Image (spheres, coloured by chain):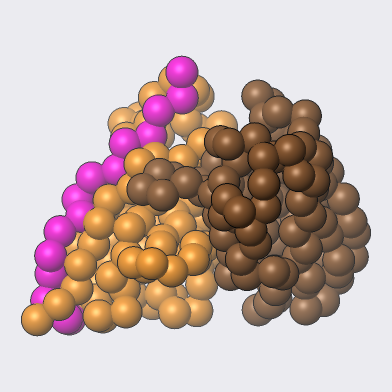
Chain colours: A brown, B orange
Amino acid sequence: DIQMTQSPSSLSASVGDRVTITCRASRSIISNLNWYQQKPGKAPELLIYAASSLQSGVPSRFSGSGAETDFTLTISSLQPEDFATYYCQQSYRTPHTFGQGTKLEIK
Amino acid sequence: QVQLVESGGDLVKPGGSLRLSCAASGFTFSDYYMTWIRQAPGKGLEWISYINSGSTYTSYVDSVRGRFTISRDDAKKSLYLQMNSLRVEDTAVYYCARSDYSGTFSDYWGQGTLVTVSS
């Protein structure tokens, strides 16, 4: 299986900060990388698919980049509603494994 | 609007069986891959299975292969997960999700149903 490793595992930031979360795949996944946001007690929501395509309805402050094994999710200016846990997922080969998550907390 | 509603979660003893259902509405169910993803209490997400449109292809994570079976009924707009030989480590919230035409991302998720495996 392809292993996905996110860093950091947790992050403290303030409203208005620019934040970057990274995700590394154990082998090349081309651009088959998705990002999800999950708030406590809720189902995850798709933010980014195919590494850099913004899902409909997702604010433009979210962006994704990368290819092969290294990917990033950037939030350009944190808003209060962005404090959540973020997961990357590869969809190059089944099982479509997730990273362990990055918990973004208010500083 | 797209809606996915899971049901069937329960408390079951190790070695027992359970069938989860997911009722879909608001989209042409038969056109989409459908996926099951689970989340153990306090843990991360785990992709466990998907099924293509037309039910000609399924895939499973190794930890459930041979014990779980995914299926769909397009006439009833429903997705199912038959879970046999349940283990304590299968305890989780199980989400069904609509995936795109090639199964590569999940754009709508249900609210989840809790399966607890305990003696």
Which residue is depicted at the point 51% across and 72% down?
B61
Indicate whether A26 appears above or below B12.
Answer: below
Q: Is residue B14 magenta?
A: yes
Q: Position of residue A101 (x, y in %)?
A: 59, 64
Which residue is depicted at the point 70% across and 73% down?
A5
Which residue is depicted at the point 60% across and 41% down?
A82
Decide if residue B92 is in sight here.
yes
Left or right: B118 as drawn, with respect to B53: left
Left or right: B34 as drawn, with respect to B78: right
The answer to which of B106 and B111 lies nearer the viewer is B111
The answer to which image quadrant residue A9 occupies is bottom right
Q: Quadrant of the C terminus of chain A?
A: bottom right
The answer to which image quadrant residue A92 occupies is bottom right
Q: Position of residue B113 (x, y in %)?
A: 27, 51
Q: Position of residue B83 (x, y in %)?
A: 28, 66
Give the magenta part as a residue range.
B1-17
Indicate whether A69 appears above or below A58.
Answer: below
Indicate whether A53 appears above or below B17.
Answer: above
The answer to which of A1 and B46 lies nearer the viewer is B46
Which residue is depicted at the point 19% across and 50% down?
B8
The answer to which image quadrant residue A93 occupies is bottom right
